Amino acid sequence: EKIAILKGVVKKYNMDGYPLTAINNVSCTIPKGEITFVYGPSGSGKSTFLNILGMLDKPEEGEINILGQDVLALNDNQAADFRAKHIGFIFQSFNLLPVLSVRENVEFPLLHHGLSHHERREKAEYYLESVGLKEYVDRRPGAISGGQRQRVAIARALVTTPALVIADEPTANLDSSTSDEIIQLMLDMRSHFNTSFVICTHNENLLNESGRLIHIVDGKLQNIGVKQ
Ligand code: ADP
Ligand code: ADP
């Protein structure tokens, strides 16, 4: 079963009047309930690939089907709704709101889902417990460690029960043992919630983890394989 199918995707940027092809004719599928690592050197097009898969940006050419929907056919409002419902994001710099508590940060994506305050709170606490942060719900992001902040971000990405979670260099700001813990947590969350993760990284160590690999060099797909 496939979460996403990309065909012939091309994304160009305008660099001082010259076109720069960031992603060139990329076709691939993202399987359901698995972790896919996207790796390649800096500047190779990994973020561009994730931004397009995550519907944050549109390609010039190609087809993108997510959960059976031709997402390029959606208008901006429909695309925003689809994204909020089905896709969660985890960023390198955590992107937590510093004035909100850990619990409020995780409640945030639920604000427009028609839930009562009590239901939002229960869901947030459930996901915070599942990432091991039960004791930290009332803290501010500034009062917890980097690894704990990324755990909050993982809970925030999962709280809307998305089919797909996209993580752009999620361990780049963490030391290596904390990085290992965060990757292990995503592997656990994948099996526990049957969520598909797509994680981009230039950290070779992460590629020791089992998962599917998409290798991008100079905007082109080099190969797709499975790491056991
Ligand atoms: P990676 O994530 O692998 O580092 P990116 O997708 O960020 O690669 O970038 C791929 C290429 O596209 C790079 O040459 C980068 O400089 C260029 N690029 C990325 N985003 C933009 C943008 N918004 N405008 C212009 N060029 C961009
Ligand atoms: P990463 O290597 O982690 O992908 P980058 O530094 O390449 O991070 O890019 C960070 C952000 O800046 C991305 O959103 C990317 O689209 C944008 N960006 C990258 N290169 C350029 C560029 N040459 N011009 C404008 N924006 C860029």
Image (cartoon, rainbow, N blue to C red):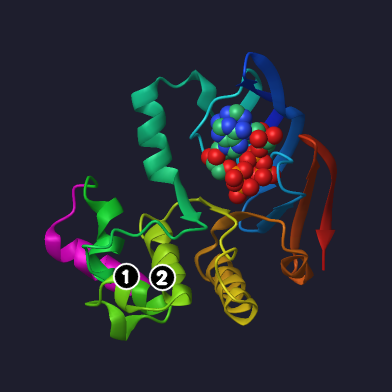
> Residue 207 falls in which quadrant of the image?
bottom right
Quadrant placement of the C terminus: bottom right
Is residue 202 in view? yes
Whether 154 is drawn above or below 41: the answer is below
- Which residue is rendered at x = 65% and y = 58% of the image? 34
x and y percentages locating residue 11 in the rendered image: 65, 25
Instruction: Compare residues 85 and 11 and report the one nearer the observer.
Output: 11
Element type where label 1 sits in the image? helix
Contact, mark 2 vs mark 1 (Cβ under 8 Å): yes
In this view, which residue lies farthest toward the left? 117
Q: Is residue 142 left or right of residue 70?
A: left
Determine which of the numbered discs, if any, sits on residue 149 in the image. Answer: 2
Residue 141's label in the rendered image is 1
| Percent x, y of residue 125 | 28, 73
Residue at 58%, 69% (x, y): give it: 191
> Can you give x and y, in whole percent of width and height, for residue 211 in the image?
73, 62
Magenta range is 114-127
Callout 2 crowding tier (Cα within 10 Å): few <14, some 14–19, many ≥20: many
- Amino acid carrying label 2: it is Arg
Q: Residue at x 75, y 70 (%)?
A: 205
Query: Residue 115 lies in magenta, yes or no?
Result: yes
* Badge number at residue 1: none
The three-letter code of the residue at mark 1 reads: Pro
Q: Residue at (72%, 63%) from the top-left corner?
A: 203
In the image, is the residue at mark 1 within 8 Å of ligand 2 by its beta carbon?
no
Would residue 2 be visible to someone looking at this image? no
Horizontal side, residue 48 vs residue 107: left or right: right
Q: Quadrant of ligand 1?
A: top right
Which is more toward the observer, 173 or 124? 173
Instruction: Give the structural element (helix, strand or loop) at label 2.
Output: helix
